[in-house]
């Protein structure tokens, strides 16, 4: 069974001159997986290869890098490439985990290298 975890970017943490427009490259964001809920940890595969990141529409997938994901300690580090963040209202992203999907190749469209291609 798949699990969806919403994460919200607080607009007060986004520089007002940045607004909704990032460079065409986007910006890598960090999410501390230890903040994920109990249901996430009971679903996600150890190592996090099944983690996918989407815009709030649940359809538009974003590149991500799972640096670590340890189900025993419920800790991990996730980076993803956001194409927008808003300095006026909350920006919501979705983290999906199904416990079975395979990880992307590092050079795949949604794999690790795509998060950092312009950095």
Image (spheres, rainbow, N blue to C red):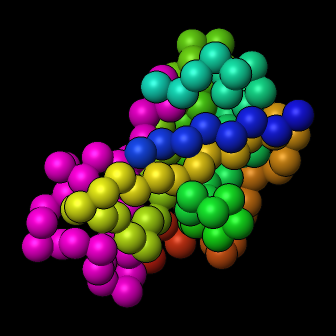
- Pick the quarter of the image with the C terminus: bottom left
Q: Nearer the viewer, residue 80 or 4?
A: 4
Closest to the observer, 90 or 76: 90
Residue range corresponding to the magenta coloring:
9-34
Q: Is residue 27 above or below residue 95?
A: below
In screen coordinates, is 98 left or right of 85? right
Q: Position of residue 61 (x, y in %)?
A: 65, 66
In this rendering, would 104 be left or right of 80?
Answer: right
- Please determine whether, in this image, residue 115 is positioned above or below residue 73: below
Residue 106: name its quadrant: bottom right
Q: Residue sitting at 42 percent across and 34 percent down?
A: 32
Residue positioned 37% across, 86% down in the render: 24
Q: Is residue 57 magenta?
A: no
Q: Residue at x 20, y 57 (%)?
A: 14
Q: Residue at the spot x=68%, y=59% of the render?
A: 58
Would you say 81 lies left or right of 108 here?
left
């Amino acid at each position: 069974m798949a699990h969806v975890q919403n994460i919200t970017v607080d607009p007060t943490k986004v520089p007002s001159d940045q607004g909704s427009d990032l460079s065409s490259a986007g910006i890598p964001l960090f999410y501390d997986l230890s903040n994920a809920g109990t249901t996430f940890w009971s679903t996600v595969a150890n190592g996090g290869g099944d983690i996918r990141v989407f815009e709030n529409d649940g359809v538009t997938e974003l590149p991500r890098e799972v640096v670590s994901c340890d189900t025993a300690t419920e800790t991990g580090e996730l980076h993803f490439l956001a194409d927008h963040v808003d300095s006026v209202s909350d920006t919501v992203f979705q983290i999906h985990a199904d416990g079975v999907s395979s990880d992307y190749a590092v050079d795949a469209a949604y794999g690790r290298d795509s998060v950092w291609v312009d950095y």
